[in-house]
Image (cartoon, rainbow, N blue to C red):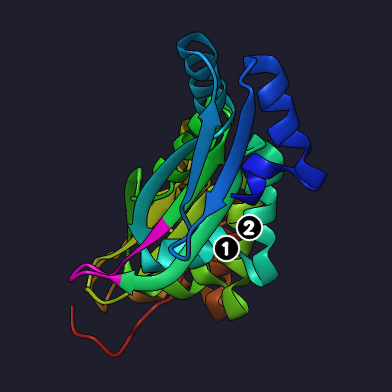
Amino acid sequence: GWRIIGKGGREVRRLQEESGVLSLWVNKSDGGWSTVEAFGTSETTECLRSLLQEAHTFHRIEVPQHIAWRVIGKGGSGIRYLEERTGASISVDARPTGDVQTCAVEVIGNAAAVSQALAWLRCRSEPQTRVQIPQRLVGTVIGKSGSGIRDLEAASGAWLNVDTECESCSVSIYGDEAAVAQAKHALQQLLDQNALESLTISKEALPFLLGRGAAAIREIQTSSGAHIRVDQAQDP
């Protein structure tokens, strides 16, 4: 209701002047909803309805609970960012409902602002793509205390979530098309830089591969940039 009333009743006065209705008042209810009542001709009240729909569009979207906390951000920083970016007013109810534990996000503003905010929220409500990573690289992707994920998010603008509950781990990427593509490319580069290949050789050939004092192995590593580990405990 306060958004329709405006500071010092400024928005109510604007609506009344532009629509031409004789009187206009807002009744606020306990449930968070407000009723706008007006007195005037059919033309002026219809004009008021159009003005309200244009400037005070309302939409509610359900998002997963873990996404709701990302939308809110630390100390509400996420909400402030989205409001400044779109011009819409954002309200998040972080209390999950239903079997799938979703939270409600309410968006209010003019039609363009609401549309922009909803587009931003929808591309972050579910993963736009997933990248499979081997278990051995989970720590590399996440980084110390999550620093790897934070760096990837800061560089791309996407949100990343690492699922480590299965043998073939995956990174879910949330965001708009450009941000998702950039994050996916960065992850693929990380995978390429940490590729693993195994080669089995006979015990007789091992001394020739190692070289004197392991000089041959060091030369291969220097020239290729790869790291080579020789496990001599296994039988060929």
**Residue 226 seen in the current view:** no
Q: Classify residue 194 as left or right of residue 98.
A: right
Label annotation for residue 78: 2
**Residue 54 seen in the current view:** yes
Q: Quadrant of residue 28?
A: bottom right
Q: Residues within 10 Å of mark 1 (few under 14, many from 20)?
A: many
x, y percent for residue 210: 46, 73
Separation of disc 2 and disc 1 at Cα?
5 Å
Q: Are marks 2 and 1 in contact (CB under 8 Å)?
A: yes
Name the residue at 53% across, 14% down: 47
Q: Classify residue 132 as left or right of residue 183.
A: left
Q: Quadrant of residue 204?
A: bottom left
Secondary element type, mark 1: helix
Queried whether the magenta region covers residue 215, the answer comes back as: no
Disc 1 marks a residue whose amino acid type is Ile
The segment highlighted magenta reads 97-104
x, y percent for residue 50: 50, 18
Disc 2 marks a residue whose amino acid type is Gly
Name the residue at 67% across, 36% down: 87
